Amino acid sequence: DTIGVAYTAFQIPMCRLVRGDKKDEIMPDFEKAEEVIKEAIPELKNSDDIKALGDMNQNLAYIAQQEGEIRRAIDLYSRALVYRQRAKDKRGTGLTFARLGECYLEVGDIATAKSVSKCAMEIFKEIGDVNRIKQVEAVLAKIQEKEKKLGGVEMEKPKTIGVFAGLLT
């Protein structure tokens, strides 16, 4: 089962990350997981398993984020978001918004980071996911810090927020 193997391949480095292993020691496992996931994508597309396509794109995005390839991560999270919305995967959609917030913050697009993080917060509050609420609160605190540092500088309007418009309806 290619899809099951892909899920497992991703979970191994994730467990190591949670356990506290050093990121540089885990990266080869993430790279292997990326290869396995990419092999599973065509099978997933043929199966019409929209939720799994969202999960796999999310996993690829997370790997890109860990590798420091933030623009690629944003692209993959955006794809995951489309699949998760189509699958009506509320928790998954919230998680994708949360990760997008982290990425946009990292590339300095504060307005978009704030907007997508607020979308994540709305979902997590609705479903009562306390741990994810804390995760998003931490990102929103970093955003607030950056806004304070910018002081009187007018905040840039989100360039990419149109992509996300109406996704919560």
Image (cartoon, rainbow, N blue to C red):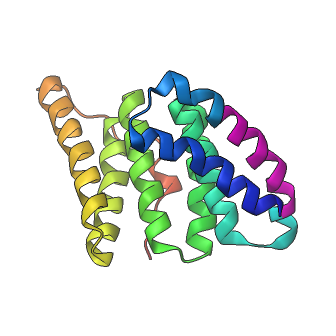
Residue 144: say if magenta: no
Q: Is residue 35 left or right of residue 17?
A: right
Q: Is residue 35 left or right of residue 88?
A: right
Residue occupying image coordinates x 23% and y 38%: 143
Q: Is residue 134 visible?
A: yes
Asked which quadrant contains residue 7, the reply is bottom right
Percent position of residue 37, x then y: 74, 48
Residue occupying image coordinates x 39% and y 52%: 98
Q: Is residue 77 above or below residue 26?
A: below
Percent position of residue 62, x then y: 54, 42
Q: Is residue 76 visible?
A: no
Question: Which region of the structure is painted magenta?
Answer: 31-43
Percent position of residue 130, x then y: 24, 66
Residue 35: say if magenta: yes
Residue occupying image coordinates x 32% and y 34%: 156
Q: Is residue 140 above or below residue 2?
A: above
